[in-house]
Image (cartoon, rainbow, N blue to C red):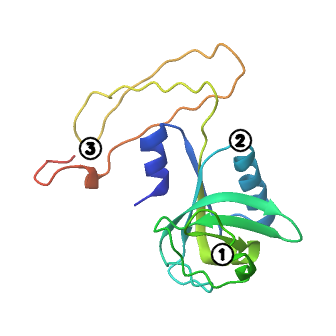
Amino acid sequence: GDPAEAFRAITGAPTETWMHDEVNSTELWKKMVNAEGHFWPMVAGSKKSTGSGVAKDHAFAVRGVFVGSDKTVMIQQPWRRHQYGGEQMQYKGQMQAPGTFYMAWDEYRRDMDFTTAALIRPGYVLSSFVVPGVGTEIRFGVLFEITDNKPFFVQLEWSRIRWFDEGCEYG
C-alpha cells in the first residue's frame, strides 16, 4: 500500500512524501527534524534491495531522528521483529519496543526510498464533500474565504480503482 494514502485515510491530514533520490541529504534531514518537532507521524519505505538486512520494499514507522556523534534514525518494523544488521548494531537489545532499531543516516538514505509525514496541526478541522458527477471528466468549482493568515490546505482525493468492489463499474 501507499503510506501517504493510509495517513490521509486515518488522519484526514495532508501529507508530504520526500523521495530520497530527489532531495539532498541536508534538506531531507531538515524536513525530518521539522516533522519530528511538530510531532508529525512519519513512515519510511525501503528499497527493493538493502545493504543493512531490513525487509525489502516494505514500510517502517520512523520513531525519531537523533544527533549524537552521528545522525541516526530510529525505526520500528511493524512485524515487531527485524533483520537489521547494519552500522548501529551496538544498540541491539536496548530497544524497549519490539522490532525497533537505529539506522545510521547514510544507511537510512541508502536503504530507504522515501519518507512520508502526515502534517497534523493543532486545531486542525477537516471538512469534506462529494463532488457531484460521473464519468472521466468532472468540472466543479469551490469558493472559500480566508479570514486570517494561518496556514491552510486544500486537498483533493479520489478513490483508486483498488478501493472498489469487484464488479463495480469505475469511470
Q: Residue at x 35, y 31 (%)?
A: 139
Q: Are marks 1 and 2 in contact (CB under 8 Å)?
A: no
Q: Are marks 3 and 2 in contact (CB under 8 Å)?
A: no
Residue 23 x/y as whole percent: 70, 63
Q: Secondary structure at mark 3?
A: loop
Query: Which-is-in-front pick, marks 1 and 3?
Result: 1
Q: Earlier in the sequence, mark 1 or mark 3?
A: 1
Q: Quadrant of residue 69?
A: bottom right
The amino acid marked with disc number 2 is His
- Say left or right for 101 vs 138: right
Q: Secondary structure at mark 1?
A: loop
Q: Secondary structure at mark 2?
A: loop
Quadrant of the frame with the N terminus: bottom left
Return the residue at label 2: 38
Q: Quadrant of residue 138?
A: top left
- Say left or right for 140 vs 32: left
Estimate the spatial distance between the alpha carbons at disc 3 and disc 2, rounded to whole Å: 39 Å
Q: Residue furthest left?
A: 167
Q: Earlier in the sequence, mark 3 or mark 2?
A: 2
Return the residue at label 1: 93
Estimate the spatial distance between the alpha carbons at disc 1 and disc 3, rounded to whole Å: 54 Å
Q: Earlier in the sequence, mark 1 or mark 2?
A: 2
| Image mark for residue 136 | 3
Residue 11 x/y as whole percent: 49, 39
Estimate the spatial distance between the alpha carbons at disc 1 and disc 2, rounded to whole Å: 29 Å
The front one of 94 and 168 is 94
Q: Are marks 1 and 3 in contact (CB under 8 Å)?
A: no
The amino acid marked with disc number 3 is Thr
Q: Residues within 10 Å of mark 2 (few under 14, many from 20)?
A: few
